[in-house]
């Protein structure tokens, strides 16, 4: 006899509790009594046969099984919305212009756009790939409706939706990182990652020279993979053939890369809001986490070598502010 399907209302309540951390506030959000919400969660736990929450002071924290269910629950709720939208004659309609650096366009945009357009077939998306500094200016000028950018406190307050490690990277097949004067491939002088890398090297009193300067992530990655230079990249930009350089290789720690959303003064804010929400939810379910197997002191992930002594931590959502 086939198992009974999961209840979408219970899953929506479950997601709300996970996001808010409180049964009481979640009950207000889903317009139910606290006792009704508690009953929903008991039934959901009975249905999956696992404990989903545990008390942590005044908050309700997900158990390991709860974390596993959360990813599935988000996908099921999103698929439900997509299905309903596909048959909605009053679905979103219009043209939106979105901007993002090519680092993020390559890793995130295909999946994000495909899902959003399936849910909103009457929306037309145009994509502009530019560095964050250019995108911030285009948002200010009203040339973009929304942008996915590297958050920089000096360039405006974006809504941070993802946090990733920023990493020193070199070629797996070369030892250029051992040169006395470190050759670097970095973005233009206004690039936040460039400023961060130079600040760390200056604090270490490490000699370096910048031999490649480009807005293009493709050019930077080519310089790294060919063994000509070292660079700094976020976790999402790692490619086969790259080696992560850590403290054991003589490189200081870098701050995390924060990925945020900027909204322009759009004539279609309802579409922008829907797309921003979709981007946030999509990035919550995209991660690049290396497996646990070790080989000769390195960690291997799709051909990427991870230096000794430091594993990547999983990508994390950072609540918007």
Image: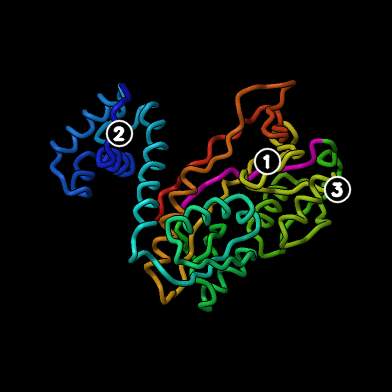
Secondary element at tag 1 = loop
Whether the magenta-drawn stretch holds residue 27 is answered as no
Q: Which residue is mark 3?
A: 228
**Vertically, is 29 above or below 68?**
below
Q: CA distance from mark 3 to mark 2?
A: 54 Å
Disc 2 packing (10 Å; few <14; some 14–19; many ≥20):
few
**Frontmost residue, 221 versus 112:** 112
In the image, what residue occupies the spot 14% across and 38% down? 36
Part of the protein shown in magenta: 161-172
Q: Which residue is mark 1?
A: 252
Q: Residue furthest bottom?
A: 141
Secondary element at tag 3 = loop
Image side of residue 125 versus residue 49, left or right: right
Pointer 3 with pointer 2, Cβ within 8 A: no
Kindly identify which numbered label has been placed on residue 6: 2
Q: Earlier in the sequence, mark 3 or mark 2?
A: 2
In the image, what residue occupies the spot 54% across and 64% down? 154
Relative image position of residue 104 (x, y in whole percent): 60, 54
Image side of residue 252 versus residue 66, left or right: right
Q: Earlier in the sequence, mark 3 or mark 1?
A: 3
Relative image position of residue 50 (x, y in whole percent): 32, 22
Secondary element at tag 2 = loop
Badge count:
3
Quadrant containing the C terminus in the rendered view? bottom left
Disc 3 packing (10 Å; few <14; some 14–19; many ≥20):
some
């Amino acid at each position: 006899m086939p198992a009974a399907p999961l209840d979408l209302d219970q899953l929506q309540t479950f997601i709300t509790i996970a996001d808010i951390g409180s049964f009481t506030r979640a009950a207000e959000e889903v317009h139910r009594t606290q006792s009704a919400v508690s009953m929903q969660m008991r039934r959901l736990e009975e249905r999956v046969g696992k404990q989903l929450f545990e008390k942590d002071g005044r908050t309700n924290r997900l158990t390991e099984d709860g974390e596993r269910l959360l990813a599935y629950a988000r996908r099921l709720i999103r698929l439900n919305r997509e299905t309903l939208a596909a048959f909605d004659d009053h679905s979103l309609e219009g043209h939106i212009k979105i901007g993002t650096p090519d680092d993020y366009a390559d890793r995130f945009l295909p999946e994000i756009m495909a899902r959003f357009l399936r849910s909103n077939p009457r929306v037309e998306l145009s994509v502009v790939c530019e560095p964050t500094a250019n995108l911030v200016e285009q948002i200010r000028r009203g040339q973009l409706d929304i942008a996915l950018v590297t958050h920089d406190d000096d360039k405006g307050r974006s809504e941070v939706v993802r946090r990733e490690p920023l990493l020193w990277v070199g070629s797996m097949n070369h030892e250029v990182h051992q040169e006395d004067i470190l050759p670097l491939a970095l973005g233009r002088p206004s690039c936040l990652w460039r400023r961060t890398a130079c600040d760390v090297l200056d604090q270490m009193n490490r000699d370096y020279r910048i031999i490649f300067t480009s807005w293009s992530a493709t050019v930077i990655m080519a310089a790294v993979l060919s063994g000509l230079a070292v660079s700094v990249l976020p976790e999402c930009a790692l490619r086969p053939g790259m080696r992560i350089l850590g403290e054991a290789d003589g490189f200081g720690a870098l701050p995390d890369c924060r990925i945020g959303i900027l909204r322009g003064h759009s004539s279609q804010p309802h579409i922008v809001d829907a797309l921003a929400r979709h981007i946030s939810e999509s990035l919550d379910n995209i991660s690049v986490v290396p497996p646990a197997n070790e080989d000769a002191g390195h960690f291997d992930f799709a051909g990427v070598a991870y230096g000794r002594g430091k594993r990547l931590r999983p990508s994390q959502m950072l609540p918007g502010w």
